Amino acid sequence: MTWFIIGIVVLLLIILGCSLWIVKLTKQEKEYMEVSNQYLKDIGKSYTKEEFSIAIFELYRNIIQAVQDENYLYLREALSDEIYNSYLMAIKNSKERHAKTIVEDMNPIFSKLISLAVKDNMEIAKVWLKVSYHEYIIDTTPPKPEELGMRMEPRVIGGSKTKLLEKEYILTLVKTRAEKESVVCANCGYVTNIVTRNACVRCGANIVSRHYHWVMVAKEETRTSSK
């Protein structure tokens, strides 16, 4: 009888735990409700929520690639001072440990615009982003004299080339409000949307200052899993 009562109590606790988890997920989905295309149209935007969300995923993927390539000029343009300095410190620490993080095959699972507000002369956006990718760490220790000239595969010292990671983030982005979000390049005449770009997509000429394209100012990781 005692074991029967214990079993009932455990079952009730499991049911209660599942119920709380479902409530939490439902609450999260409500908190992360997507902005509607009608709302974007009402505030004068020429892009859809789908176009914006894809553009922000591409911006995030470019940021991660720029960290890997140590493209400081791009990072300086795409990030706030705080996030830029945090990535800079991470790169410095990795170099001191003779290690480098490699991110490959990043793809969006979903990307949703959950908030877009215009305050005075500033625009603030939040995007709920889930991505999948492979991540591993390679050894960058300089070769020994007897190894010079030898072609060697970098040694993997962490992570996995085959295990697929899935991560969710809430990205916060800001920019100065602009009257026009599409700019004609003075160099080649091509029209570029400046949602995420400050350079012409055709010739690469600078077309807008840092203040007038989206800059990532915060990144909150909400969930991680692997397959």
Image (spheres, rainbow, N blue to C red):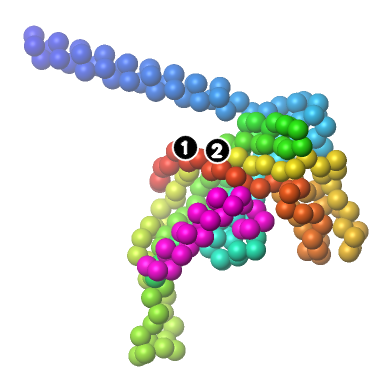
Give the camera-side residue of 155 and 114: 114
Q: Earlier in the sequence, mark 1 or mark 2?
A: 2
Outermost residue to the left: 1
Q: Which residue is mark 2?
A: 170
Quick check: 49 left or right of 164?
A: right
Q: For residue 65, what is the image quadrant?
A: bottom right
Q: Residue 52: image x %, image y %?
A: 71, 40
Estimate how packed mark 1 is, as few (under 14), some (14 to 19) or many (20 or more) residues with alpha carbons within 10 Å: few
- State the quadrant of the N terminus: top left
Q: Residue 33: image x %, image y %?
A: 61, 26
The image's mark for residue 222 is 1
Which residue is rendered at x = 44% and y = 22% of the image? 24
Magenta stretch, overall SS: helix
Q: Which residues, given as a range, are shown in magenta?
A: 75-97
Identify whether 156 is placed above or below 63: below
**Dot 1 amino acid type:** Thr
